[in-house]
Image: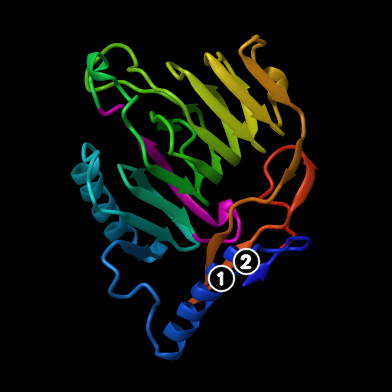
Amino acid sequence: LIAMPDYSPTASTSALIALLWAACCSSVLEGRNWYDGIESIAVFSPKEEKAAKELLDAHYGEMLQDEFSTRRFAVFLKSGNYPSLSIGVPFYTSVAGVGLRPDDVQVDSFYTESRLPTNLGGATKTFWRSVEGLTTTNSKRGCTWATSQACPIRRSTIAGDLRLSGRFGSEQGDGGSSGGFISDTTIRGHLLFGTQQQFMFRNAKIGSVSSNAMNTVFVGVDGASSIPKSNKSKVIEQTPLVAEKPFLHEDAGRWDLVVPSLKQQTNGPLSNEGDE
């Protein structure tokens, strides 16, 4: 356990920490990985980039339209560079870098496409997926995250533009998209809302914003001054009180649960402050 300063876990958090810690310790003692034999978890290192790409590409094709699947899947990427890995993230899938910092795990890009024609809803029926702990390196490609709710991006850095809506197939315009949440993330390029109806950002850094959605909230966002003014947007300069979501960290076979500290009056991403 890496417990950051000034944070007191609740009873439920303490129980979760104890269970995870016991699982990891027992695995080490028995000479095996804690995730061995769990079909819904895949763990890769940079030297396994080809295998990671093959699995992720196949998984994206299988789960892209599987809205009511009972399958759940998590992919953990160990620290290092994955230069050709462009990650599609479909239904019921979480992709997480398990470095201590977002720039510990570098990939080409990640994306979710608009999965339905515009007349059938576009991305308004695209839910239940997440990305965290990644830094993308392809500034020309950027990232497309055409989703609607329950699809957070956390603790990441995007080298180029971030597009929050997308096109289906050969359609000329973006399909609908409706809602999302991004925190502890840097967007170095443009933030492009497209057809997004509502969105919330917290403790993020944004290069520039060329348009706005119908209903947006920015809390503790560095770059909020570039956001077009609207009576349907709310900008709060500092986050009054926050503790980021705990996350898994792997180093040379050792796994820890990192519990970020409680912070007050913050602006911008928190994951690079170095207070573990």
Look at the image and name its color scheme. rainbow
Q: Give the structural element (helix, strand or loop) at label 1.
A: helix
Q: Which image quarter is the C terminus in?
A: bottom right
- 176 above or below 182? above
Nearest to the observer: residue 191 or residue 8: 8
Whether residue 69 sits left or right of residue 144 in the image: it is left
Nearest to the observer: residue 213 or residue 75: 213
Type of amino acid at the residue the image marks with label 2: Ala
**Residue drawn at (21%, 49%) of the image:** 58
- 173 above or below 154? above
Q: Residues within 10 Å of mark 2 (few under 14, many from 20)?
A: few
**Residue drawn at (23%, 51%) of the image:** 70
Type of amino acid at the residue the image marks with label 1: Ala
Q: Give the structural element (helix, strand or loop) at label 2.
A: helix
Mark pair 2, 1: CA separation: 6 Å
Queried whether the magenta region covers residue 105, the answer comes back as: yes
Q: Which disc is residue 260 wearing?
A: none
Nearest to the observer: residue 196 or residue 102: 196
The x, y position of residue 136, in whole percent, is: 49, 43
The x, y position of residue 207, in whole percent, is: 63, 27
Q: Which image quarter is the N terminus in?
A: bottom right
**Residue drawn at (67%, 38%) of the image:** 203
Q: Which residues are magenta?
A: 98-115
Residue under label 1? 15
Nearest to the observer: residue 269 or residue 52: 269
- 250 above or below 155? below
Residue under label 2? 11
The x, y position of residue 138, in whole percent, is: 46, 38
Queried whether the magenta region covers residue 111, the answer comes back as: yes
Q: Marks 2 and 1: CB-CB under 8 Å?
A: yes
**Residue drawn at (34%, 16%) of the image:** 174
- The residue most toward the front is 11
